Amino acid sequence: MKKNEDCAIKVHKVTKKFKVYYDKPNTLKERLCFWKSSNAEERTVLKDISLDINKGEVVALIGTNGSGKSTLLKLMTKIIYPTSGKIITNGKLTSLLELGAGFHDDFTGRENIYFNASIFGLTKNEIEDKMEDIIAFSELGEFIDNPVRTYSSGMYMRLAFSVAINVNADILLIDEILAVGDQHFQDKCFKKLHELKDSDKTIVIVSHNLRSVRQLCKRAIWIKDGVIKIDGEANKVIDQYLEECK
Amino acid sequence: MQLIQNLYQYRELLKSNVKKEIRGKYKGSFLGVLWSFINPLLQVAVYAIVFPYIMRVQTDHYLQYLIIGIIPWTFFTTVINQGMIVVRMNAGIIKKVYFPREILPISVAISGLVNFMISCIIILLFCLFGGIGITWHFLLFPLIGIIQFLFSLGLILALSAINIYVKDTEYIVQFILNLLFYATPILYSSTLFPEKIRWVLQLNPMTEIIDAYRSVFMYHQLPSLEGIIYVLLIALLILFIGLAIFRKLEKGFAEEL
């Protein structure tokens, strides 16, 4: 497999199987007793998927619940690994799968920005440089120096999203979190995403909000039962998807 | 190589994790971090009372002898106990984001090393005021500390990963640690044993390590070269195996947790 410079994410023949246990053996005794007679059932979530995403592309993954979109995204971030096949990513990658990873409730918003940003691999100087941007974007104002546990859920999400979107990654993976905050903040997030799109970042979004997908993405990939059903121009794919959903 | 590059990139995470390990352990307790020094001292007090009077152990400067045994041993067990569960304790972030997972056990080992280096002040104080004195030899202790660090790091890399798949690991290791405490000349001197079987004791890397500390702090001499080379080789071997096991198993962490 040759390394293509324009390619941001290369998914090559990826299959992902999960083991579904009815009664998971956790202890040594159980492991030994049930060595052979495994009560696990294998479930194939993704079947032999191949796709290339080029640098600067904004791609949406659409499909019904349980079709494997989120699994694919998790594979791209290297939280889980494929059963077979290969995924190569090129460039600094940030995922917004679940917001607020590494937040500690007893610490202030400002301290949590440090924790969260350091998990994304930023150094102290980089974090300090971005601190003002992050705080400004979150619009938390004076609340930034209050402990996070005093935040409302909206404020919490706003802070988390502000950190994630300001880490300056080359590739951004977003899983259905555009429903963050109030209307005003959502609009702001969209504006930011459009900005990122124009600055040649690669973005992969999983979303059920098809209207915003149409606005943001040129390309959409419809995943159905673990295989790619259609991959192409966003509007066309979405139209066909809606057709089938009826 | 890849690992060092990763660690360098994520150094901020490593730093804040180490701080969290050091401070977080005793968070909420009245004396806070001081407990990591009080604990071994209390333990020393118990043994210092029990052994000379009840067991009639005759060793010169037994108090110092004990302290130099117990403080490195505490370093070892704290790292193992905390390191073994570190992956499980961080299930939340492991399932949410990617970061080099090795950072978790590494920060436990580093925080243990930092704690130990500070605890060595206690050893020095006891040597100074206990009639033994110190010589330049004690400057070698960080070197022994680093060998011990590598050794324990290798162990917790393997154990923390295995513990995710087989939860019994914690209990088994707990038992082995208890056993090892008596199989290491901490409370007694290895000269109690006849020459013929002493080599069994010497196989235990912790024996060599603790003997080395005693050489530099108490006996004011260089540790035995063969001993140091032996533990260094063992430590590197364990580290290599531990890292290989961790690498192999880390891919399943998010699913198993």
Image (cartoon, rainbow, N blue to C red):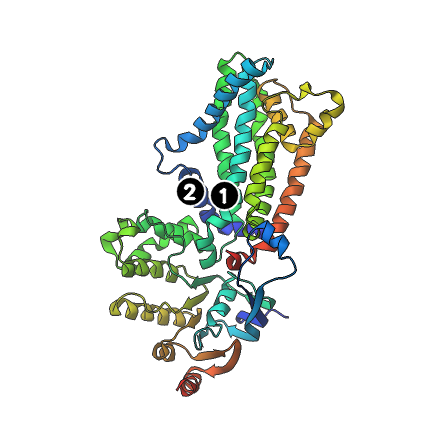
Q: Position of residue A181 (x, y in %)?
A: 28, 65
Q: Position of residue A99 (x, y in %)?
A: 38, 60
Which amino acid type is marked by label 2? Lys
Q: Residues within 10 Å of mark 1 (few under 14, many from 20)?
A: many
Drawn side of residue A88 relative to residue B40, left or right: right
Please, what secondary structure does the residue beneath circle 1 have? helix
Residue B159 visible within the image: yes
Q: Quadrant of residue A61?
A: bottom left
Drawn side of residue A27 relative to residue A187, left or right: right
Check residue B107 in the rendering and tell me which mark sits there, or answer none: 1
Are circles 2 and 1 on residues that touch, CB within 8 Å? Answer: yes
Same chain under badges 2 and 1? The reply is yes
Q: Position of residue A164 (x, y in %)?
A: 39, 60
Gap between marks 2 and 1, in whole Å? 9 Å
Q: Along the polypeptide, which appears first: circle 2 or circle 1?
A: 2
Chain holding disc 2: B
Chain holding disc 1: B
Which amino acid type is marked by label 1? Ser
Residue position marked by numbered label 2 in the rendering: B20
Residue at left offset 70%, top offset 32% = B203
Q: Position of residue A179 (x, y in %)?
A: 32, 69
Residue at left offset 30%, top offset 56% = A135
